[in-house]
Image (spheres, rainbow, N blue to C red):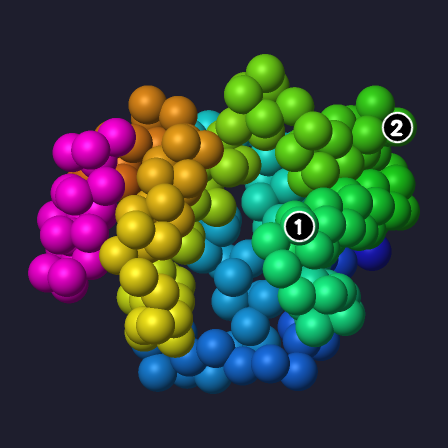
Amino acid sequence: MKQPNKLACAMGKVDVANRADPNIELVDGQPLPKEYAYSLHMTRWLHELESEPSERMQIACRAQHIERWTMPRRDFPEGRKAYYEWRQACGRMHGRRAAEIMAECGYPKAEWERVETILTKRELRKDEDTQLLEDVACMVFLERYFADFYEQNADYDREKWLRIVRRTWGKMSPRGHEAALRLAEGMPAHLLALLQEALAED
């Protein structure tokens, strides 16, 4: 029997892992395991932003939230500092799991170490691959989760929302900005107004 190539092997193993998520997201009316759905959004946006992405970027985007439900936010204290500690812990876990899978699928150490570095985002702004991952993640947030996040946190004051939008914008490259502005044209009016206000004062 013909063995799958390394990329198909790695993507398949990441999908199997994420399909175990007990949480559900509706995508076009179809219930999917939440982190599996997220991984599909990441893959789609990767190909929107990069016409011929490398294998390591395809794996990194697919594994961006691999098994994240196993490290829930509630396991960390409240507060902004603890939130960032949780995010960093998640990044290390995602990088480690992606590296394990790539090693199992026959990738050389240099490749799975690169993906581990990308997923921990230690080189954001300095590394093109890490920046591309961040652009993709920001586009997924803006398209799929921004509206719900806004509704769930309606008690935030206007200044806090402006800071959130500016922080998201600040993580993105010019290529990401262009894609976000195109996407914004179809946003609900209140979110578009928020984005415009945040950028006008940036």
Tell me which secondary structure the magenta stretch mostly adopts.
helix
- Residue 100 vs residue 134, the one in the foreground: 134
Image quarter (top left, top right, bottom left or bottom right) of the C terminus: top left
Where on the picture, by quarter, is residue 22? bottom right
Disc 2 designates what residue?
109
Image quarter (top left, top right, bottom left or bottom right) of the N terminus: bottom right
State the residue at coordinates (32%, 72%). Answer: 154
Give yes or no for residue 192 being in the magenta stretch.
yes
Cα–Cα span, label 2 and label 1: 33 Å
The numbered mark, 2 or 1, whose residue comes first in the sequence reads 1
Whether residue 195 is visible here, answered yes or no, is yes
State the residue at coordinates (14%, 61%). Answer: 190
Instruction: Determine whether, in the image, residue 132 is placed left or right of residue 86.
Output: left
User: Bounds of the magenta span?
Assistant: 183-202
Instruction: Determine whether, in the image, residue 26 is placed left or right of residue 177.
Output: right
**Amino acid beneath label 2:** Lys
Name the residue at the top extreme.
126
Instruction: Determine whether, in the image, residue 24 is placed left or right of residue 114.
Output: left
* Kind of element beneath mark 1: helix
Residue 6 in picture, x, y percent from top left: 75, 41
